[in-house]
Image (cartoon, rainbow, N blue to C red):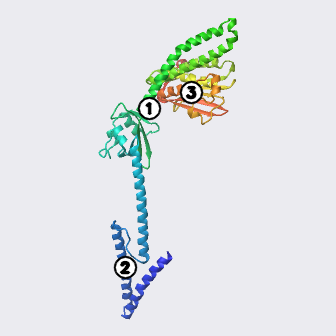
Amino acid sequence: MAGRHGTEYWRLAGIALPALLLGALLGMPGWGLALGLLAYLIYHLRNLARLRDWLDNHHQAEPPEAGGLWGEVFNHIHHLQQRNKKQKRKLANALSRFQQVATALPDATIILRETGEIEWCNEAAKRLLGLRTPQDIGNHITNLIRTPAFFHYLNHEDFSEPLEMPSPVNSDINLAIRVIPYGRSLRLMLARDMTRVQRLEQTRRVFVANVSHELRTPLTVINGYLESLADSEEAVLRPWRKPLQQMQQQAKRMARIVDELLSLSRLETKPPPLLEKAVAIPALLANLKEEARILSGERKHDIRFEVDESLWLKGAADELESAFSNLLSNAIRYTPAGGRIEVRWYQDDTGAHFEVQDSGVGIASEDIPKLTERFYRVDIARSRATGGTGLGLAIVKHVVNRHGASLRIESTVGEGSLFACDFPSRLVSRAVTKAAALS
């Protein structure tokens, strides 16, 4: 840098000194120096004009010829231009590849501004959502997709779960729509055709329901005969008593699996409950308390209930009883003899909560997200030994979802587990107790 400045200083000196000497010879050294500086200024102004003309002329690739500092400036700008062109080509190629990939996607893909206007969409968006290009580019998405559920979903701005809705151009097509904010003010909207998946799921539900229903009758007959044979005092059956008891135990377990599969099928196929009738949860828990003590039997668990007697809940009584019973029976099955089980039913600022906390073996953190899957069991051998079917928590999850609630699971290996159903405040109903009425 110092060398470049030095060259320019010599250039200034080469113009100013001869002008000063010429002015001295003519008896006007000041005018001579002024004329020299004016010539130097004209030199810079001329190069500035060349720089402007070059920058304005986009077709001229090569920089103007110049020496000294101006030559360095021209070359440096030229290098910056070349690098910028390379970056533009890379970005253009990347954008082109993105558009090619997005266009080929089977899912409808739409880029939205933060305010909801369409910037770009692929071919699948035209087929699944009825969008047109270029006519619809710049239009607000809710002007083109007028489904109320979609309008609420987009404006509510809670995109943690996808929205399921029929296609606006074909009601036989079911879509799952997800919105993903990205960048500073853009949103990526994806719409996937879920029709085939939902039909397969419906076929599976019908198949499971039909098979479970068909198995129920023969299992009832088998259980009846096994019970009669196991209780018989015939001498010829005495050697078979233990095998018959084992067969009876497994047949009963199979019957429980069938019953729970039928329960799941009913939960999946029935419309959601109206959530208008208040359920007396304290009375329901009083019945479960007696059942829990019977189920605990000789293992003598320390079972404690803490219940808000005036706290009722709007919902389906049979479904809530099934969910609470499953959580309580699971705690009894997987808590060692003499262990402690605490049941709480209370309300706070977020809503009503049913909690079952045990001092059992606990569950590893990696297993917790899978617990509500059908037939998933952390320890299969132990689950079979305790009579577990692997369907109880799946039933609980369906029940809480149908009530707009959530299932919360906390556990530490070796210390125990907490299973909780968290219900929103809008379902809470308060009943006047006798004690409150007398007071």
Camera-nearest label, 2 or 3: 3
Residue at x 42% of width, y 55% of height: 91
Q: Contact (CB < 8 A) between labels 3 and 1? A: no
- Residue 13 x/y as whole percent: 43, 84
Q: Residues within 10 Å of mark 3 (few under 14, many from 20)?
A: some
Q: Which mark is residue 197?
A: 1
| Disc 2, SS | helix
Q: Residues within 10 Å of mark 2 (few under 14, many from 20)?
A: few
Q: Which residue is mark 3?
A: 375
**149 w.r.t. 331: above or below:** below
| Disc 1, SS | helix
Measure the alpha-carbon separation of dots 2 and 3: 87 Å
| Disc 3, SS | loop
Query: As shown in the figure, which amino acid type bears the numbered disc 1?
Result: Val
Judge by depth and name the residue closer to the eye, 363 or 109: 109
Q: Which residue is mark 2?
A: 43
- Residue 275 seen anywhere in this rendered image of the structure: no
Q: Contact (CB < 8 A) between labels 2 and 1? A: no
* Image quadrant where one finds the C terminus: top right
